[in-house]
Amino acid sequence: MKRKDLLFYIILLIGMMAAFVTTLVYPPRARFFPIIVISLCGFFVLWSLVKMFIAWNGKSSHSEYRKKNEVASKPDEGYRRQFLITVAWIGAFVLLIWLLGLAAGLPLFVFAYIKTYDEGWRWSIILTITMFLIVYGGFAILLKIPLYEGLLF
Amino acid sequence: MIDSIIQGVGVLFQPMMMLGMFLAVVAGLTFGVLPGLTGMTYMAILIPFTWGMDPFLALMVLVAGHAVSTTGGAITSILINVPGTGPSAATLLDGFPMTQQGKAGRALGAMLIASGMGGVEGSIVLAFLIPIVVPIVMAFGSPECFFLIVMGLSFITALGSGSKIKGAISALLGLLVSFVGYHDATAFPRYTFGSIFLFDGVKIIPCALAMFAVPEMINLMISGSSIVKEGTVSRAPMADMWEGGKDVFRNWWLHIRCVFLGVFLGIVPGVGGDVACWMAYGHAKTTSKHPETFGHGNVVGVIAPESASNGKEGGSMLPTLALGIPGSAAMAVLLGAFLIQGIQPGPTFLIEHLDLAWTIVGTLVLANLFGIVVCWFAAPMLIKITRVRGNILAPFILCITALGAYSYRNSLGDIFVMFALAFLSWPMKQLGYSRPVFFLGYVLGGLAERYFGISIMAHGWKFFLTPLSLVIIAVTIISMSIQPLSDYLKRGKSS
């Protein structure tokens, strides 16, 4: 957890620095509140980082601490793999919507996901049709919401 | 007066009106359940169909559906951690953990009774306040609104759990997201990176879905298990729901306080229902004897925001009906519906159409009661969703979530924004950052900046020296110091 915390703090710090530089060019009234917020956030992130390093330095042996920390925070290999697969699925989901639009992309995603995880044809077909009915029948026809049609259509 | 009440309320009991109300309640609940579709969307879609209808029927159909939409939104908040409407986001903090513990029935029962009763009580307060609303609304200028927002922000300390530094960082990140888009006073676009889409800022529904729904779906996809873990024992849904209903009566004093808070914040134009729910939650936590149980499935955390959520409907009707000032975007849509019917809300409305005003009060009461009945019988069926496997549920809900983000303003950009924010919210969830605090910062940040700017322009730097502002500042300081003071006294006693 410590290593993940450290990584998140570093990302936040870089983000805050970028936001600070971006905000400086805004007119005085437009930057008044953001500058206060960014400065405070940056201060808290920096403070947390310093505290983390002090705690790290305070340990009797760095290598021992690191080893201990690695053992404590070593994520389950299966979990990590599943996480990466999930991120890939979400990427595919966004891509499907972008390329095929909502009426085709959403039911297709439901079908592909459920079928991949071996939930059987019955659930795959029922939920795909239900999704299509919700998107097309419910939103497009009944509510008259103009659906995004996709880059390919 | 009595004649108007009899005439106005009596109209509601005609068979055609009752049928219309039932259908409107079902439609309103459905809109609430679907993320992205709110009571306002319901009214906006239905307005063209009310053209040519009898004004009583038309306005009853619109008000009834709108009144129960937040109740519908709370159902998905509790069962699947997806807030159907903006105000429902506060309900999921304790509602969803209750579901995970197999207490979905109890959470739903508490939500339905708190929400339904809140709506009824809010309408009764509305009825009593109609004659005296003008001075109340006029007393709230921009400085007072600013300090009300600051009061809401002060609850950030109460909402957070765990590390105080992480809580502060979450709140500041939320505030930062609220600054995206045009700055109100200077019309200068901030953090838009040249994207015209972001000029309008990050909208509340994509943000709420990104903060609460998407991380939950990611975790469901990773684990593949159901929301309620295998082997979790839960009682029969009906028995549990009765228990939840009784919880509201056990906490009746808190319920009443939150309803009044909702009504009061509903009356103040521009503050909004989201603020009311979060303030009610913060109030419940700060005044609780066991604040540490909040966020882990405390039923009081469901009762407080739901009481305020529907209580505010009565309050927000007041300035719309009596002054012709819509307090929220939804009320602006309702105002449009009035004008289409050839009725002008405002001071003369209560003289010329008092019977219609009573019809609206009666509609709020009856629609909330109908809402309770409909949800009460539908809930046991809905609870079964929580036992569906993650591999089946997650992709389906993810699609509904994307559809909700899209339909908020028919924009693909909102889906992208939702997933972009989810890349922030998922690590926040995993690393113990408070997402409710982030969301509160986001909801209040833009409002605080807006009212601060207006106050400075209108009154200069001494804008806080109005009597009402000073009262609000004092209340804020007192409410913030209650918890630390009682902790200090407890420590003193124990040592």
Image: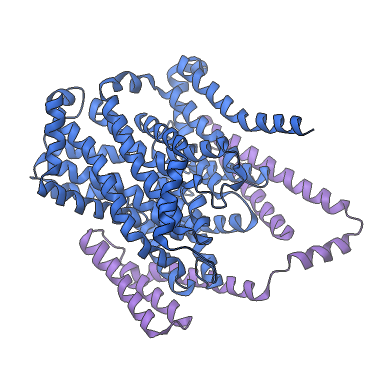
Residue A66 lies left or right of residue B267; in this view the side is right
Residue B9 lies left or right of residue B141; in this view the side is left
Report the label total. 0
Which chain is depicted blue?
B
Q: The C terminus of chain A appears in which quarter of the rendering?
A: bottom left
Question: In this orientation, which residue lies closer to the viewer: A111 or A18?
Answer: A111
Q: Residue furthest right?
A: A60
Residue B141, given in percent of the width and then of the height, sits at 40, 22
Up-down relation of residue B199 to residue B184 (above or below): below
Up-down relation of residue A118 to residue B267 (above or below): below
Q: Quadrant of residue A70?
A: bottom right
Residue B487, given in percent of the width and then of the height, sits at 68, 33
Which chain is depicted purple?
A
Residue at 56%, 33% (x, y): give it: B154
Question: In this orientation, which residue lies closer to the viewer: A26 or B36?
Answer: B36
Up-down relation of residue A48 to residue B387 (above or below): above
Residue B121, given in percent of the width and then of the height, sits at 33, 35
Q: Is residue A151 visible?
A: no
Q: Quadrant of residue A47?
A: top right
Residue at 76%, 34% (x, y): give it: B494
Q: The N terminus of chain A appears in which quarter of the rendering?
A: bottom right
Residue B12, given in percent of the width and then of the height, sits at 15, 41
